[in-house]
Amino acid sequence: MERQAHNRRRNTSIRVRPRKAPQTPQPLSPPLSRRPSRPRRRPRAAAAAAMLPLARAALRRLGPVTAGDGSLPARLLLLAPLASKPSSSTPPEYQMPSVTWGVIQGRRERLVSRVLALDFLRSAGVTDPAGELEAVELPSSLDVLQERLDFLLRLGLSTDDLSAYPFLLACSLRKNVIPVLSYLEKLGVTRARLAAFVRAYPACLHASVAVDLAPIVKALRGLDVDRQDIPRVLERYPDVLGLKPDGTISTSVAYLVGIVGVAPRDIGPMVTHYPFFLSMRVGTTIKPFCDYITSLGLPMRILARIIEKRPYILGYDLEETVKPNVEALLSFGIRKEVLPLMIAQYPSILGLPLKVKLAAQQYFFNLKLKIDPDGFARAIEKLPQLVSLHQNVILKPVEFLRGRGITDDDIGRMLIRCPQILLLRNELMKNSFYFFKSELKRPISELLEYPEYFTYSLESRIKPRYMRVASKGIRCSLDWFLNCSDQRFEERMRGDFIEGDAPGPSFTMGGKLQMPGNQLVSDDDNEESDDEVLYRRTVML
């Protein structure tokens, strides 16, 4: 009963509050259709370019860059309140500074400091006719800019060099310039040559030592370039530091080794003497050149041997130089089947201003030596170096022969048969001619028929072989005992009869070596040196 009375009293004390109607939640922002439109912001570069004239006009009214009394100029005083007092309006945008970049600045401060920096560089003699510095981020502090300018000038660069490549002033000394120069000196580039190196390839100061430079040096060492030759390669072709090891370098080397047949051991010396081929593209430069040369009849194996010794021929422009030179040779009477022999003997003929040289030499041979154009073509076929031989050098052997009573017509026939005598020194010719007259005691007609006599060594071939022939009482021609190998000469000395003169070995480009009697050289005889034997037979000197 007591519990029921207590419950009645508690129920009467509780007040019932009226329930409120549920409220609809308000959106946090107005709908998109009611949002006020904001003006479209211009890009930062366009806004900066638009404000630069205004900033220059304002600074022009403040006076010159330097003060005459040594006090702080008004232009520099302008930066102090801008850098210290915060703006009461919208806070400016900031950028992360570098190690030597100066103070953090907003948009207006950056515009003012840029105008000051450009005016400072112009007053120092660094011009920017192309307007490249307008898009370059320069340091905000003139002290930092002065430090960079002084360092580059002490290095050996001039204001003209900086005007030609003003991006050098955007390189941080601590992060870019000093690490790169220290690494180059560590590789062996002398400090005296650093200025020339940077002048030839200024983009190297933008590179990273660990990411860009070290992998290239490692790739060069992997191509068997000696460590002491690395500075030579870099100084000769500084742009190699901008290549990618797994890009053009690997493809060009792979094509030369795998397709052309260049020996891998010769890649290192090739890079040392002509590193420019590392940047040549296979599809546009190397392959078209090799295909064209082999189409003339030169075997790929011989071309590989030529490239190993003279890799600079890869740099000859195919359309502008090589093809016009081949056409010039054909137009001057050179037979097409002889072109491969000429290229193998004198590869540089592909890169000369050939048409002018051929015209000058042909006129000289006709005027001074009485040799007609056809005879000139035959002489060029046997000695293509004649196109580069100076006329004074040519006249010295000619004058020697004239002094021995040989007529100009006979001299012309001798030069057509053996133009190599034009490369001999008069002292050697004099000794050989004296031995011919005093010991051999033969008529001058034999010398006219075989002018190659002058090209043999007097002490190592002519005298010893003549003594052997004279001891046996053999009467033979000069060609019979001089134009043969030592082994063949011994066979002739042991023989019971004297065989007639036979033609020497001949070589048809693109085929096998043909010996007299139509006997083919066996493929089993010294197979590894077959290329070298083939190459020696094509080279006359």
Image (cartoon, helix red, strand yellow):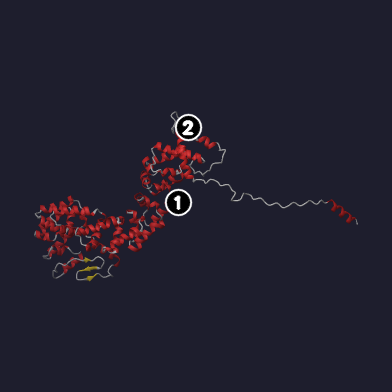
Name the element at disc 1: helix
Name the residue type under label 1.
Ala
List the residue tagged with mark 1. 210
Q: CA distance from mark 2 to mark 1?
A: 44 Å
Q: Which residue is at a point 31% across and 61% down the rendered structure image?
A: 290
Name the residue type under label 2.
Ala
Q: Position of residue 6 (x, y in %)?
A: 88, 54
* Nearest to the observer: residue 205 or residue 493: 205
Asked if residue 451 lies left or right of residue 271, the reply is left
**Do tag 2 and tag 1 residues touch (Cβ < 8 Å)?**
no
Say which quarter of the image contains residue 280.
Answer: bottom left
Q: Position of residue 144 (x, y in %)?
A: 46, 39
Q: Position of residue 333 (x, y in %)?
A: 19, 59
Crowdedness of circle 2 by 10 Å Cα count: few (<14), some, many (20+)?
Answer: some
Most extreme residue toward the front is 33
Quarter of the image that includes the C terminus:
bottom left
Where residue 74 is drawn, which disc sits there?
2
Say which quarter of the image contains residue 523.
Answer: bottom left
Most extreme residue toward the top is 69
Asked whether the viewer can see residue 465, the reply is: yes
Name the element at disc 2: helix
* Nearest to the observer: residue 92 or residue 236: 92
Most extreme residue toward the right is 1
